Amino acid sequence: MKIIGIGSAMPSLAVTNEMLSVFLDTNDEWISSRTGIKQRRIISKDSLKELAAQASLQAIEDAGLTPKDIDFILCSNTVNNFVVPAFSCIIQGEIEAACPCMDLNVACSGFMYALFIADSLIETGKAKNILVLCAEEASRIVNWNERDTCVLFGDGTAAVVLTEGDSFKSHHLSAHSKVEPLYYQRKLEYNPFMKNADGDAPLVMKGKDVFKLAVSSSMSDIKTVLTKANLQIDDIDFFLLHQANMRIIEAIRDNLKQPVEKFPHNIEKYGNTSSASIPILLDELYREGKLEKGNKVVFSAFGAGFTSGAAILEWTK
Ligand code: COA
C-alpha cells in the first residue's frame, strides 16, 4: 500500500488559551507549560460534514483521481451528531462517491487502525483506491466547565488516498481494555424494561494515567514496527506521533534518544485532534515540502480503550 493523496481541512475559529481563561480558571502559562498547546481550532460557523468533505476532495484531487475512482471509504470518527447513518455514508454522498463505506471508532488510534484495514483490503485485491478519512469534533464531548480536559482538545479533519504499492513496511496494533482512564458516556433513550437508566458523563480523564499509558504503548509499538520492518531506530527520518501533549512527545523522544528535528509537531496550533492529528501533521509536512522521497517515517498513535498502533512507511510521493 502507498499514500497517493493527502488533504486536510480545519475549522476557521482559532481559540487561544487567553480566550479560555475568560470563562475558565486557567491561564496560558499553565496550558503551554503542561501541554505545549497555544491554541486549538473549534467548529463554530463551519460543520464537521463540510470540513470532512473538503479534506476528502482535496486528498482525492491530490491523488489525481475523482470521487468515482474511490472504491472504499473508511472513516475514523469518535463522535458526530448522527448515530446512524455512518458518517462515512454522509460524506460519500457529499463528495458524490459511489462505493461501500464504513466508520470505525478507535478513539485517537483510529488512523492507525484504518490504515491497517485499508492495507488488508488492498493486499487481498478487494479494493484498489481507498479513502481514509479522520473527522473529529472532540469539542462536542468535553465539558467546557472542566479545565482538566477541555483545554487539551481541538477539532479537525484530514484524509489520505491509498492504493497498491510497497510504501508501508510494517504495522502493529494493540488494545488493552481499560475504560477508567479515559471515557465519554452518553445517555441513550429511556427503555421501560431496564432496571437502571444509563448515566452520562462528558469526557472523563485520569491525565497522569493516560500520560504513562501513552508513553509506554508508543515506545513498545515503535520498537515492534522497527523489528518487523528489520530497521534500526537511526534509519528513521521522522516520527509523526499523535499530537496529544508536547510533554508526551518529548518523553517518547528522550526514551528513543533521537534528535528534536525528527519529531515535527503542530500541537501548539491545533491541540489534540484525536485520530485526525497524524494525517493533519502529515498534510502540513507534505505541503511545506518537508518530506523527501525515500524518507522513512514512523506513525504512532494511542487513545481511549486503551488502544494504540504504529506503522512505518517509506515516503514515495
Ligand atoms: N489550568 C490551570 N490549572 C489546571 C488546569 C488548567 N487547565 N487543569 C488542571 N489544573 C490543575 C488541577 O486542578 C491540579 O490542581 P491541584 O494540584 O491543586 O489539584 C493541577 O493543575 C494538576 O497539575 P499537574 O499535576 O501538574 O498536572 P499534570 O502534570 O498531570 O498535567 C495533563 C495534566 C492533563 C496536562 C497531563 O496529565 C496530560 O496531558 N495527560 C495526558 C492527557 C492526554 O493526552 N489525553 C488524551 C490522550 S489521547
Image (tube, rainbow, N blue to C red):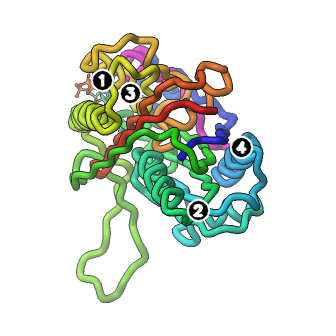
Mark 4 vs mark 3: give the one in front: 4
* Dots 1, 4 in contact, CB < 8 A: no
* Dots 2, 4 in contact, CB < 8 A: no
Disc number at residue 63? 4
The residues bearing labels 2 and 1 have C-alpha atoms spaced at a distance of 35 Å
Residue 233: x percent and y percent? 32, 22
Q: Is residue 39 magenta?
A: yes
Mark 2 vs mark 1: give the one in front: 2
Query: Can you tell which quarter of the image residue 98 is in?
Result: bottom right
Disc number at residue 127? 2
* Residue pictured at 47% horizontal, 40% vertical: 168
Residue 20: x percent and y percent? 51, 28
Query: Can you tell which quarter of the image residue 75 is in?
Result: bottom right
Look at label 1 and name its amino acid. Answer: Ile
Q: Sequence-wise, which precedes: disc 4 or disc 3?
A: 4
Look at label 3 and name its amino acid. Answer: Asn
* Observer-nearest of 128 and 248: 128
The residues bearing labels 1 and 4 have C-alpha atoms spaced at a distance of 33 Å
Mark 2 vs mark 3: give the one in front: 2
Query: Dot 1: what SS?
Result: helix
Look at label 4 and name its amino acid. Answer: Ala
Is 278 displayed left or right of 235 in the figure?
right
The residues bearing labels 3 and 1 have C-alpha atoms spaced at a distance of 11 Å
Query: Dot 4: what SS?
Result: loop
Look at label 2 and name its amino acid. Answer: Ala
Mark 1 vs mark 4: give the one in front: 4
Residue that mark 1 sits on: 252
Mark 2 packing: few (<14 Cα in 10 Å), some, or many (20+)?
Answer: some
The residues bearing labels 4 and 3 have C-alpha atoms spaced at a distance of 31 Å
